[in-house]
Structure formats: C-alpha cells, structure tokens
C-alpha cells in the first residue's frame, strides 16, 4: 500500500519538500498531496527588487499547481482541523485527507501590529515592509516620488527569515538614488538591534566597512521606536 503524504503549505518549503518526495518515491510507493488556501505562489526572494523597479509583481507570482511535479495533488482550501490521533486533515470544504506522514510548512504571518506605533498614522504611507507584495508595491510608489530626505532601514527584531535582506535593501537604495541623481539629497540609515551590521563578526566588520564607504549610517543596539519628523521617511525592513 502506498504511503499517504500530506504537505500543509504550498510556499517555498512545502513545494520543495513535495517535489523532492515525488522524485524519491514512485506513484505506487506514495501519494503526495499539498494543501494551501490559495493558488498564488510568491517567489519571496524577488520581493526586495520590486520597490526599485527591477521586477514586477506578475513576474514573482505563479500558480502553485505549476510549481508542483506531475503526480502531486493540490488542494486549494483552508485547513479546518488536523486530527493527530486519527492521522487525518479536514479541509474547510469537508474534504478529509488521511495521512501516514504529515509535513507542516505553513510559513509565517507578518505582524507589524506587534511593534507599538508601527501601524498607526503613516503605515503604508511613510512606513513600509517589502516582505509582502502589497507592501513592496506601495514602497515602490513611495520611493518613485521621494524627492530627498532621510530613509531608515529599520531591522526591528531578531530573528528574521533572511538576515542579509535588510542590508541588501540599503545597498539597493544607495544604487537606486545614485542612478536617479538623488543620492546627495538622501540620507540612508541602517538601524539594527544587533551590536554590528550582521550576525557574524567577520562578515559584520566587512559589511560595516561597505556601509561606511557608501555613506550609509549604521546605528547598532537600537530599540524600535516609531517617531517621525516632517522630512523623515522610514522603510521598515522586517515586521
């Protein structure tokens, strides 16, 4: 009898796991099912390029079904209940998926409201995240019309799912404003709760040097406080 494998989540982790399992087992050895609430697979590493006009949202979003190998069944549904005693998953539409192996790859949910003041007046107007498509698109519009002032890349807390992404954003911002002839009018600050630019001492030292070369201010051991003056602009790198 074929093993029944159910993967909860069709993001990067769930998709890679399902595809590798499909390559590992023949159809008669295992049935593989993937469940997700929608059919929109977002290539998250590409989101950082969207605010700078280096990609478009439609290039980053594909149907989840198209990312899965042949022989994997995709269910587009919310998950109603997981019964670990009976080894089965019940979907919102009443479908029941019994399993021998359950893989949980449901990912994370952004919670900007957990940082006091972040989602008050100015959220998605002067404060943004590039970790989802709507936020990255709104940030793109804000940067396009940004005449100058201070841009703060604020690493609110650790851990985050990609430690290097906020630094990449700061460097991309430097390049973006340089190409537009605005770099002299923009102050860029990189604000982090860490005691250096990065999590590893050697990399931290090298990256701090690059920040200095590019005239990007580095503020370490910082606690997130959301305050803005009339000419301030903050791009929140992680929530």
Image (tube, rainbow, N blue to C red):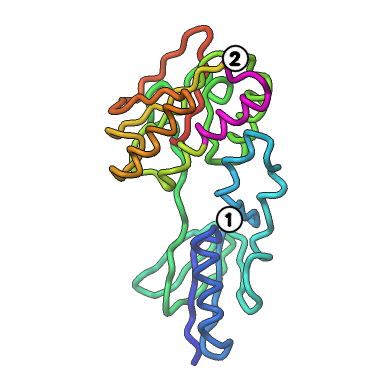
Figure quadrant of residue 204: top left
Which of the 4 quarters of the picture holds residue 52?
top right
- The image shows residue 135 at horizontal and vertical percentages of 58, 34
On the picture, is 144 further left or further right than 152? Answer: right
Q: Is residue 205 above or below residue 185?
A: below
Task: Give the residue displayed 62% in from the left and 55% down from the top.
Answer: 41
Asked if residue 106 lies left or right of residue 55, the reply is: left
Which of 238 and 99 lies nearest the eye of the viewer? 238
- Would you place residue 178 above or below residue 130 in this image? above
Disc 1: which residue: 37
| Residue 194 x, y percent position in the rendering | 30, 34
Q: Nearer the viewer, mark 1 or mark 2?
A: 2
Q: Which residue is found at the position 43% from the left and 68% from the top?
A: 103
223 left or right, relative to 19: left
Residue 170: % across, % down: 50, 32
Answer above or below: position of 133 versus 128: below
Q: Please say if 43 is above or below 57.
A: below
Residues in magenta, as a range: 169-185
Residue 174 lies within the magenta run: yes
Q: CA distance from mark 1 to mark 2?
A: 41 Å
Provide the residue designation for mark 2.
148
Give the overall secondary structure of the magenta segment: helix
- Magenta region includes residue 65: no
Q: Which of 179/17 is in front?
A: 179
Mark 1 crowd level (few <14, some 14–19, many ≥20, 10 Å Cα) = some
- Residue in front for this viewpoint, 45 or 196: 196
């Amino acid at each position: 009898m074929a093993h029944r494998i159910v993967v909860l989540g069709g993001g990067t982790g769930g998709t890679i796991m399902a595809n590798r399992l499909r390559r590992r087992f023949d159809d008669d050895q295992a049935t593989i099912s993937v469940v997700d609430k929608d059919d929109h697979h977002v290539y998250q590493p590409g989101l950082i390029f969207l605010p700078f006009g280096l990609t478009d949202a439609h290039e980053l979003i594909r149907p989840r079904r198209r990312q899965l190998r042949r022989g994997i069944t995709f269910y587009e549904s919310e998950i109603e209940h997981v019964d670990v005693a009976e080894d089965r998953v019940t979907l919102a539409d009443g479908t029941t998926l019994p399993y021998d192996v359950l893989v949980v790859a449901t990912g994370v949910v952004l919670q900007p409201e957990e940082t006091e003041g972040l989602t008050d007046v100015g959220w998605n107007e002067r404060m943004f995240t590039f970790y989802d498509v709507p936020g990255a698109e709104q940030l793109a519009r804000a940067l396009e019309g940004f005449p100058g002032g201070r841009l703060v890349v604020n690493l609110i807390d650790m851990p985050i799912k990609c430690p290097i992404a906020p630094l990449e954003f700061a460097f991309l911002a430097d390049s973006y404003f340089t190409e537009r002839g605005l770099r002299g009018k923009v102050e860029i600050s990189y604000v982090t709760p860490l005691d250096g630019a990065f999590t590893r001492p050697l990399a931290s030292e090298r990256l701090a040097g690059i920040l200095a070369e590019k005239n990007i201010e580095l503020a370490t051991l910082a606690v997130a406080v959301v305050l803005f003056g009339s000419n301030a602009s903050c791009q929140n790198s992680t929530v």
